[in-house]
Image (cartoon, grey):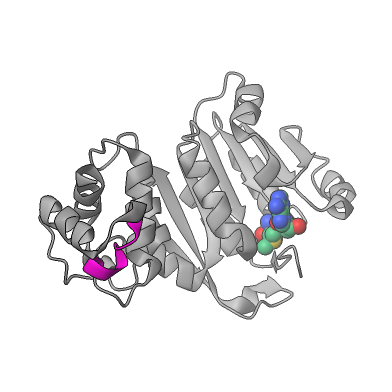
Amino acid sequence: KALGQNFLTDMQVIDDIVAASGAGPDDLVIEIGPGLGVLTAAAAEAAGKVVAIEIDEKLIPILRDVLCTYGNVKIINADVLETDLSALIEEERGGLGAVRLLGNLPYYITTPILMKVLKARLPVENFTVMVQKEVAERLCAGAGSRSCGAVTAAVSYYADVRFVRDVPAELFSPRPKVDSAVIELAVRKQPPVGLKDEDAFFEVVKQSFSQRRKTLGNSLTGLRGLDKAGAARLLEAAGIDPQRRAETLSLQEFADIANAL
Ligand code: SAM
């Protein structure tokens, strides 16, 4: 339970995840949390090579057994959050082309792993993941929508998010309490907005959503020690009405505030 071990039992969902990733014979796939290896096997059929990172050592002999007929699968017993993915890609890529990440993610690491992968600017084409349905909806909504949060704005800076499909709870064993969905994050080649300082952008996003019911004039008070008048001057310099709330801001408007800061 602590490791989010809800295993997929539906072959159609598994095929849909692999298809959404676009994995082909020239690609390296890195799978996070292979579990019992069902998704790994499907990925191995499609991709040139699959490297699967599983934290639970008890699953490793099962994975080796289930996947023994695939010559293109490597299983690593490690915590993905502690793994140097950049070095791993360098080591495993060989002559392969695109690198694609996929996984039916344990919910407790969804945000940390998304941010880790995106912030590290890994040479990765896309990241196809199963997440909690509510998280999928929030990530797909993008900046400027009511369900947008700090993670949505941060993720949409790095990636284009696409909804792939719903996955109801009964398609897992054991059955989780909530429904899930598959999304594909296509990593952007170019940032969607121009920033003088990326750290300032993430600080502004985080602070703006820290008290989402408040207006920006209030929520940005305290950012880098700004008092209320300072926050008002910052918003004025960025051309943003201090009465607005974070969820109404586009990525460009967050960028305008960060650049004014
Ligand atoms: N891919 C399998 C499937 O779809 O049936 C299993 C998915 S299950 C939701 C999540 C898997 O991630 C489990 O096997 C769990 O042990 C593994 N896991 C949890 N935390 C992890 C971490 N930090 N690093 C690597 N694997 C992890």
Residue 256 percent location from the top left of the image: 19, 48
What's the magenta bit mostly, secondary-structure-wise?
helix
Judge whether residue 34 can be spotted in this image: no
The quadrant holding residue 137 is bottom left
Residue in the foreground of this view, choosing between 261 and 29: 261
Residue 67, compared with residue 96, is above or below; it is below
The magenta segment is 216-223
Q: Is residue 219 on the magenta stretch?
A: yes
Query: Does 93 sit left or right of 234 as displayed?
Result: right
Query: Does 124 sit left or right of 71 as displayed?
Result: left
Residue 254, compared with residue 64, is above or below; it is below
Residue at horizontal 66 percent and vertical 53 percent from the top: 39
Quadrant including the N terminus: bottom right
Quadrant in which ligand 1 is drawn: bottom right
Residue 171 percent location from the top left of the image: 63, 73
Residue 75 percent location from the top left of the image: 77, 40
Residue at horizontal 50 percent and vertical 49 percent from the top: 115
Judge whether residue 241 can be spotted in this image: yes
Residue 79 percent location from the top left of the image: 73, 47
The quadrant holding residue 240 is bottom left
Residue at horizontal 59 percent and vertical 38 percent from the top: 29
Q: Is residue 206 on the magenta stretch?
A: no
Query: Does 210 sit left or right of 38 as displayed?
Result: left
